[in-house]
């Protein structure tokens, strides 16, 4: 660093580094230890700040922003409670591989360790829930560290990072280091592709009689190229394809080869195909326990190929035959090239037989439910929402629970980055702030948060944010006055003892909307549902849609805990003895 | 309709549902080169405790002052699958530069240093000194009724010496944990 360089304050360095990183939006909440940065923020025009009402919401909003744009989400929080409130969002982002950078204020360096006001060991607390974090004690290292933080967040498997900046470091003067002057050698995940493994994969692919492609969020994280290559692979091989919750949209739901989502609440055809296949190509997914069901009965007869950028995902839950470590786009490109070079062969005849088998599973119509003319079935509500919004420039977020699964089952995603949901961590309260982050990034688009009333209440304070920034998000709340998924498990597993799984004091959502000066709509009649949804879509501002639904509906189909893919229970089936004692200990 | 939970008092752990893989657990000595920065040890230890891996022994010290590098030597045990997970998890940490599995790489020199304080008089004292000589332990401190020995060797040797000193008045001991390097003329 040249001493002749002009010195600026740490706070200025923060803003300058963010601008150089291309940041246009920050979600945050000010407080004592981050005030110098907020002062700088005030004196510039390039970065827009969205004031949330709780730091957790800032992190989820940043996640929504990141996942819908492919960019990095940025968050400002103050020390102590500001930082600890960001922990849930950091953990959520770590589990779902979402790149976010949290900048936290810290008490001045000379007070660290003294139990100062609003002091917390932020770096210690967030160590296990970030890819990496830094406490900066020298203003001269500030710019360099921020550039490094952005590099780590987006390199390899994306994820959250945190930079903790004591207040005196924000006030002190130091030199700015440009992005291009900062070496990225310190973090270079090793990726090597063995051509022999590619050839082996292709040989298996050519001979497969019962192939399946199982995709996950890694395809979307890799980007547009990966998505296009995946679609090409599917259309050229005519292989069936299914996806995890995180991967919805990488292959279009209207596509011919789409089997629907797999896993605990996936379709019968997807799970049966996974179980019976003889060749599995896993692309950017991680064999999560929601996907595999009983692990020792998971797809017993298949040759498994796993494409993943993170070597620690390979052979973690399921032992695979061929690991292909690297970016999905790069590996798919090589894979397709190798296959085409060898003549683009597939075992068409056997494949035809396989599709016939799949067709029979499809005929089971595992998503069917009994509709009602007197009460709105939650599935019906989502189907109508889908009907009214299909083809729109639309983004969907969800909270966590039954409504989330129904949204995944009944909404069709044609493109990637259109579906924001908390998969790995299962964070109730994710959806509302995430929808705000999405709307900030896409001001002209239709953004709907499909919610359950219990989850939604967890971050309902964000109504203030929606109103302040005129973010016309639609909060579509399936209100069953219950913690629906908890209730379902209590019914199936705990002798119908509904321990604390209902809310006795729900707000009047219409009046709540009114209190914030936005529109509230209540609907409890299936006949009036269409008009009500249309009214929601027609309203130019934020809407709380209180959709009163059947209170005791269960989400099916379902792989009960501790069961295999081919032991799914369907909605119509009797549910007794479906979960063994061993299964009961699983979540 | 539902499970009778009381029936399942003796309910098994969820882990029993996993493939009862007959993979045996084995000890592995991992040599990890890390940036010598604040918190790096906490990161590594946090990984082990957070994911439920074993630490049988751990040593850490700076080995390259100008390059700010430290070497952490960890002895851990697990099935081959778990050991591979540990290495993969370590490898993706930002301050970790290299993870070397000395157990897989071949023969490694593994040493521990231990200090023993043995109190005794008369024949006990003579016997302690005689055994120390057999083990090539050095006397590093002495009073009229005690010896303090320093012993270097592999863990079995340290264990054996401790066992012998026990009836001869072993008061307390301290040991470093294993440090290790690959044998031969190549770097690990």
Image (cartoon, rainbow, N blue to C red):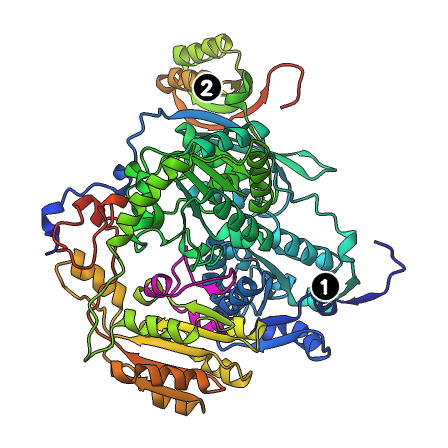
**Prevailing secondary structure class for the magenta stretch in the rendered image:** loop
- Bounds of the magenta span? A406-435
Disc tally is 2
Residue that badge 2 annotates: B158
Q: Is A520 located above or below residue A339 in the figure? A: below
Q: Nearer the viewer, residue A433 or A9?
A: A433
The mark found on residue A17 in the picture is 1
Q: Which disc, if any, is residue A90?
A: none
Where is residue A158 shown, x and y percent of the image?
56, 52
Does the image show residue A587? Answer: no
Residue A355: x, y in percent?
34, 44
Q: Is residue A317 magenta?
A: no
Q: Residue at x 47, y 23 (%)?
A: B116
From this view, report whether residue A490 is shown above or below residue A306: below
In contact (CB < 8 Å): disc 1 and disc 2: no
Identify the residue at horizontal 52%, vertical 76% (top origin): A52
Image quadrant assignment for residue A451: bottom left
- Vertical side of B147 occupied by A569: above or below: below
Rendered location of residue A219, percent (x, y): 52, 51
Q: Is residue B122 visible?
A: yes
CA gap, disc 1 and disc 2: 54 Å
Viewer-nearest residue: B147 or A184: A184
Q: Secondary structure at mark 1?
A: helix
Disc 2 element: helix
- Residue under mark 1: which chain is it in? A
């Amino acid at each position: 660093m040249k001493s002749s360089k002009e010195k600026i304050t740490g706070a200025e360095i923060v803003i300058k580094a963010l601008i150089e990183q291309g940041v246009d939006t920050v979600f945050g909440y000010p407080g004592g230890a981050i005030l110098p940065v907020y002062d700088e923020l005030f004196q510039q025009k390039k970065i827009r700040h969205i004031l949330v009402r709780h730091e957790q919401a800032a992190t989820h909003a940043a996640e929504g922003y990141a996942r819908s744009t492919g960019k990095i989400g940025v968050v400002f929080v103050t020390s102590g409670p500001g930082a600890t409130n960001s922990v849930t969002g950091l953990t959520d982002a770590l589990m779902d591989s979402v790149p976010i950078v949290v900048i936290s204020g810290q008490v001045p360096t000379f007070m660290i360790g003294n139990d100062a006001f609003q002091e917390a060991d932020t770096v210690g607390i967030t160590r296990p829930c970030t890819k990496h974090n830094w406490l900066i004690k020298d203003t001269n290292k500030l710019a360099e560290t921020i550039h490094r933080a952005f590099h780590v967040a987006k390199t390899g498997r994306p994820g959250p990072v945190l930079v903790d900046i004591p207040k005196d470091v924000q006030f002190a003067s130091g030199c700015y280091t440009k992005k291009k002057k900062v070496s990225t050698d310190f973090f270079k995940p090793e990726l090597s592709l063995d051509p022999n493994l590619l050839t082996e994969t292709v040989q298996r692919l050519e001979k497969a009689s019962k192939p399946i492609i199982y995709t996950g969020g890694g395809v979307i994280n890799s980007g547009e190229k990966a998505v296009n290559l995946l679609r090409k692979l599917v259309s050229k091989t005519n292989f069936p394809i299914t996806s995890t919750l995180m991967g919805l949209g990488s292959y279009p739901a209207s596509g011919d080869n789409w089997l629907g989502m797999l896993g605990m609440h996936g379709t019968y055809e997807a799970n049966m195909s996974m179980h019976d296949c003889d060749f599995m190509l896993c692309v950017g997914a991680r064999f999560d326990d929601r996907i595999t069901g009983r692990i020792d009965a998971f797809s017993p007869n298949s040759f498994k190929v796993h494409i993943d950028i993170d070597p620690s995902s390979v052979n973690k839950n399921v032992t695979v035959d061929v690991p292909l470590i690297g970016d999905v786009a790069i590996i798919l490109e090589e894979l397709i090239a190798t296959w085409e070079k060898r003549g683009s062969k597939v075992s068409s005849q056997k494949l035809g037989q396989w599709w016939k088998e799949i067709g029979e599973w499809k005929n089971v119509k595992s998503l069917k439910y009994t509709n009602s003319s007197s009460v709105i079935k939650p599935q019906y509500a989502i189907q109508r929402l889908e009907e009214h919004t299909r083809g729109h420039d639309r983004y969907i977020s969800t909270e966590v629970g039954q409504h989330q699964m129904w949204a995944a089952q009944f909404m069709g995603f044609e493109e990637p980055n259109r579906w924001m949901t908390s998969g790995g961590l299962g964070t109730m309260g994710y959806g509302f702030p995430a929808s705000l982050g999405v709307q900030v990034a896409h001001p002209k688009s239709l953004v709907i948060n499909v919610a359950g009333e219990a989850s939604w209440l967890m971050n309902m304070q964000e109504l203030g944010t929606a109103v302040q920034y005129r973010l016309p998000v639609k909060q579509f709340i399936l209100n069953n006055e219950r913690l629906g998924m908890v209730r379902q498990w209590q019914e199936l597993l705990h002798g119908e003892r509904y321990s604390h799984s209902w809310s006795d004091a729900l707000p009047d959502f219409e009046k709540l909307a009114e209190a914030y000066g936005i529109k509230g709509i209540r609907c409890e009649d299936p006949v009036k549902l269409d008009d009500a949804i249309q009214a929601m879509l027609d309203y130019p501002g934020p809407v709380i849609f209180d959709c009163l639904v059947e209170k005791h509906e269960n989400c099916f189909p379902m792989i009960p805990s501790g069961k295999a893919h081919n032991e799914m229970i369907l909605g119509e089936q009797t549910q007794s003895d479906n979960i063994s004692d061993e299964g009961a200990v699983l979540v | 309709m539902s499970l009778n939970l009381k029936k399942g008092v003796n309910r098994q752990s969820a882990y029993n549902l996993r493939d009862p893989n007959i993979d045996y657990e084995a000890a592995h000595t991992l040599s990890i080169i890390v940036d010598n920065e604040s918190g790096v040890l906490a990161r590594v230890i946090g990984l082990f405790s957070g994911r439920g891996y074993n630490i049988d022994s751990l040593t850490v010290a700076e080995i390259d002052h100008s390059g700010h590098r430290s070497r952490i030597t960890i002895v851990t045990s697990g099935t081959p699958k778990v050991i591979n997970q540990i290495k993969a998890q370590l490898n993706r940490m930002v301050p970790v530069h290299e993870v070397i599995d000395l157990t897989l790489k071949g023969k490694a020199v593994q040493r521990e240093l231990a200090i023993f304080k043995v109190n005794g008089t008369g024949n006990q004292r003579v016997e302690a000194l005689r055994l120390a000589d057999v083990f090539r332990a050095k006397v590093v401190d002495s009073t009229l009724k005690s010896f303090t020995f320093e012993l270097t060797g592999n863990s079995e040797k340290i264990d054996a010496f401790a066992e012998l000193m026990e009836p001869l008045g072993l008061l307390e001991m301290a040991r470093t944990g294993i440090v290790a390097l690959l044998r031969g003329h190549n770097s690990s």
